[in-house]
Amino acid sequence: MALFHPDNCTMSERHKQIYAYCELAYTAVDFSAAALFVVGSILFFKEATTYVGTWLFLIGSILFGLRPTIKLFREIAYIRLGKYEDLPEGTENNTGWLNPDMK
């Protein structure tokens, strides 16, 4: 399995779930970072609120740094799943990773 290959998200239902969760997280982080930058920019118009604006810029920057981390997490999760359709019949029920309900 190649990292960041566009077909990785369609290999199994679990792959599709991981993709959906990661896209949701990515979008939430992206939106939050952008909102913090906008509010931080507005706070820079008054000298009294510049300190808070600076903190919002810092938090927004950290969130923007989290974006590639989410994508890397997604790809690592795909690798941990392996090639789902190459597994022998019933194997997917014997591993905790493929079936997170198992303890």
Image (cartoon, grey):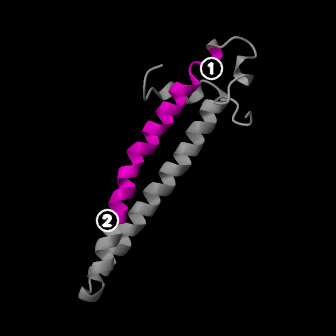
> How many neighbours does mark 1 have within 10 angstroms: few (below 14), some (14-19), or many (20 or more)?
some
Direction from residue 103 to residue 86 in the image, left or right? left
Q: Residue furthest front?
A: 103
Residue 18 figure quarter: top right
Residue tagged 1: 84
Q: CA distance from mark 1 to mark 2?
A: 40 Å
Q: In the picture shown, does residue 75 fall above or below 55?
A: above
Closer to us: 56 or 39: 56
Q: In the picture shown, does residue 82 fall above or below 22?
A: above
Label placed on residue 26: none
Residue tagged 2: 58
Q: In the picture shown, does residue 83 fall above or below 52?
A: above
> How many neighbours does mark 2 have within 10 angstroms: few (below 14), some (14-19), or many (20 or more)?
some
Direction from residue 71 to residue 37 in the image, left or right? left
Residue at 54% in and 26% down: 80
Three-letter amino acid code at disc 1?
Tyr
Three-letter amino acid code at disc 2?
Leu
Q: Which residues are magenta?
A: 58-85
Residue at 74% in and 37% down: 101
Does the magenta run of residues contain 72?
yes
